[in-house]
Amino acid sequence: MKFIRTEIPDVIICEPLVHGDNRGYFVETFRQDKLEDFLGFNLIFCQDNESKSSRGVLRGLHYQLAPSAQSKLVRVIQGKVLDVAVDIRKGSPTFGKHVSVELTAENKKQLLVPRGFAHGFVVLEDNTIFAYKVDNYYSPENDRGIAFDDPNLSIDWQIPHTELNLSQKDTKQPKLKETNDLFEYGVNYYE
């Protein structure tokens, strides 16, 4: 497993080693020890989630407040998505900036989205299966979101807005500057 820091160093691309031959392939998609060695702290996942979506479905930008904040390790099993992580840590040098990575069944890349970031993805191919691990359980009372189309975020979702398919919840999220439900840069949300 190869770990690559992105332009926002806390967001990490994980590239597994794929062993392929005429029979197919084998890939180790997760190793707790290697991830912890790279991060320098324990990150224990407790829940796995999976969704299947059609092209144009956009889910996000979502996050949970402490004490239910979540790190996510996301990947595509089938199809293709554009995955996005937005820094929502007030005081961070990258506050309001985002990382976007294309995750596909073919490239097998994964994205580690840490606590303190909003997360979302748009589906680029029909019948896409998206899977992710989280390190904290879902908490409806701590569930929050940011508007996917906030012009200050400048996210290119690669699909025209008229072709996007969003939940009612995701069409009503506030812009980043309109919410006080954020994280503080420098606070350890893993303790």
Image (spheres, rainbow, N blue to C red):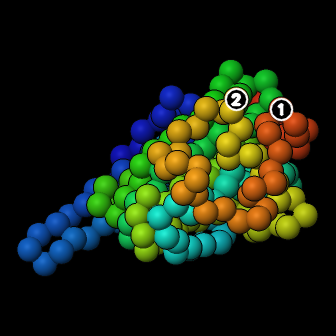
Viewer-closest of 164 and 86: 164
Question: Which amino acid is tagged 1?
Answer: Lys
* Residue at 42% in and 49% down: 102
From where the camera sits, is residue 100 visible?
A: yes
**Res 150 → quadrant:** top right
Q: Identify which amino acid the numbered label 2 is placed on.
A: Asn
Q: Residue at x 36, y 46 (%)?
A: 2
Counting from the top left corner in percent of width and height, residue 36 is at 54, 50
In-front residue for pair 37/76: 76
SS of the residue under disc 2:
loop
User: Residue placed at 30% from the left, 66% from the top?
Assistant: 27
**How far, Cα to Cα, is label 2 from label 1?**
9 Å
- The x and y percentages for residue 130 are 50, 67
Answer with left or right where residue 189 lies relative to residue 121: right
Query: At x 49% / y 50%, what residue is drawn?
Result: 159
Q: Can residue 41 be spotted in the picture?
A: no
Callout 2 touching callout 1 (CB < 8 Å): yes
